[in-house]
Amino acid sequence: DLWNHPYVSPILGDLSDYPPSMLIIGTQDPLVDSTKVFAKKHQQSSSHECWLSICEGMDHGFYFFPNIFKEEELAYLDIRQFLARHLK
């Protein structure tokens, strides 16, 4: 079953060499629970940072709509900080 392959579903794979990752999710996103599980597994398995940002009341992809939600700007601020640390 291809859906269970770690390239398709990284949560099912070995995360020990997974790169630094940033996850941004809204509490109303249907993927919020699996994202939390993935972040926890990443944090426990890898020596690389996993930054999880959970935005209250936001739906899936809320940051793709400029100037609609104040949380969108906060998400991009987090992204800038994350990239500044990891792209040297």
Image (cartoon, rainbow, N blue to C red):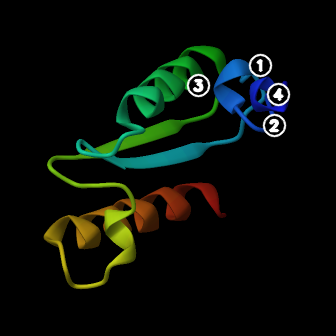
Q: CA distance from mark 3 to mark 1?
A: 9 Å
**Residue highlighted by disc 2:** 7
Q: Quadrant of residue 51?
A: top left
Q: Amino acid at mark 3?
A: His
Residue at image location 49% in from the left, 29% down from the top: 39
**Residue highlighted by disc 3:** 42
Q: CA distance from mark 2 to mark 1?
A: 10 Å
Towards the viewer: 11 or 52? 11
Q: Nearer the viewer, mark 2 or mark 1?
A: 2
Marker disc for residue 5: 4
Give neighbour class at mark 1: few <14, some 14-19, many 20+ (Cα, 10 Å). few
- Quarter holding the C terminus is bottom right
Q: Quadrant of residue 48?
A: top right
Q: Earlier in the sequence, mark 2 or mark 1?
A: 2
Find numbered disc 1 in the image and state the secondary structure of the residue it sits on.
loop
Give neighbour class at mark 3: few <14, some 14-19, many 20+ (Cα, 10 Å). many
Q: Quadrant of residue 16?
A: top right
Residue 12 x/y as whole percent: 70, 20
**Residue highlighted by disc 1:** 14
Tag 4 near tag 3, CB within 8 Å: no
Is residue 30 positioned above or below 26 on the image?
above
Q: Earlier in the sequence, mark 3 or mark 1?
A: 1
Q: Nearer the viewer, mark 4 or mark 1?
A: 4
Is residue 87 positioned above or below 41 on the image?
below
Tag 4 near tag 2, CB within 8 Å: yes
